[in-house]
Image (spheres, rainbow, N blue to C red):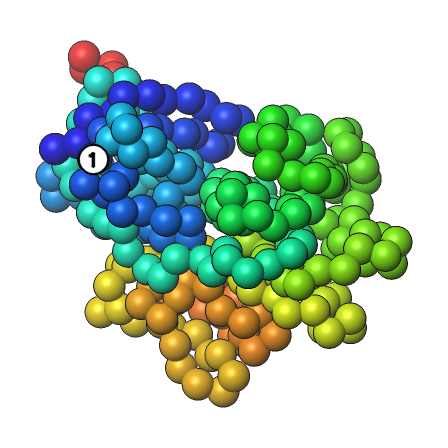
Amino acid sequence: MYRIVKRKELNPTVTLIEVDAPRVAAKAKAGQFVILIPDEGGERIPLTVAGCDRDRGTVTVIFQIVGATTEKLNAKREGDFIHDFAGPLGRPTVVEGFRRVAVIGGGVGCAIALPVARALREAGAEVHSVVGFRNRDLVILEDEFRAVSSVMKIMTDDGSYGEKGLVTDALRALIESGAEYDEVIAIGPLVMMKFVCRLTAEYGIKTVVSMNPIMIDGTGMCGGCRLTVGGEMKFACVDGPDFDGHLVDFDEAMKRGSVYREKERAAHEAACRLLRAGENNG
């Protein structure tokens, strides 16, 4: 059992928890993930490590409430326990040997992008961060990104905060203003990563994407995170989650990702009913 030592709601649908897991904290690196099970008999879900404190032995994960399991996880409070918390898993993001890198984060993908930006900064790279959200109410981790970024751009779809537009608008402006990047790292919704890669291909800039959003089981056994990269089949959890974005077949990945959307929504609604019933009975 793993105790939650901190819990913070970052916005109405995104929550941060810090978990007492010293063996995971001792080895976790940027880009890796953990598999957790909220309670006995619960579903396994992969969540990327958003940070760790090796001295305290804690690991931070940030999740969006999208289904039954994340709803159950969100119902836990400080002092409660998570049944299983295994990791670190996956290949760490390469952060050494860069002069300047642009880190692009979209929505809750910023929780994955932040530790990468931090690790790049610690490795000596200049970091330019571009983060995008639908509106001001959904902005997360702004101060944390500013602390590790030489340049920071916040984009919102409706212009309610930062600049109005897409992350690709800001990235193009930076490139055309003369910023030269050794690499671009994009982490967020599949459609966002697709268009970031389309943009960077115009300028011949190497681009890495995290395919964490399509992972399910985290071991390669379920096959749910298979994707085509450069014409070859890969598994996001065991071969990645980082891949050359210019080789990823995003259209295939997006089509597969939508297959269970209705079932996920139904499971989420059922979990909410059970949680409400438990509260009323209590």
Which residue corresponds to mark 1? 22
Q: Residue furthest bottom?
A: 231
Vertical relation: 169 (above or below) 150 = below
Amino acid type of the residue that numbered disc 1 sits on in the rendered structure: Pro
The residue that appears at 41% across and 62% down in the rendered structure is 241
Q: Position of residue 12 (x, y in %)?
A: 51, 26
- Tell which of 23 and 37 is nearer to you: 23
Q: Which image quarter is the C terminus in?
A: top left
Where residue 78 sits, quadrant-wise, is top left
Residue 108 seen by the camera = no
Query: Residue 190 vs residue 273: left or right?
Result: right
Residue 262 location in percent, x, y?
Answer: 42, 54
Give the vertical position of 69 relative to 230 (above or below): above
Residue 25 can be seen in this image? yes
The quarter in which the N terminus is drawn is top left
Please, is residue 64 above or below residue 98 in the view?
above
**x, y percent for residue 161:** 75, 29
Q: 14 or 88, which lies in front?
A: 88
Residue beneath the point at 70% across and 69% down: 205
* The furthest residue to the right: 177
Whole-percent x, y for residue 227 in the image: 43, 74
In the displayed structure, does residue 223 sit left or right of residue 262? left
Within 10 angstroms of label 1, few (less than 14), some, or many (20 or more) residues?
Answer: some
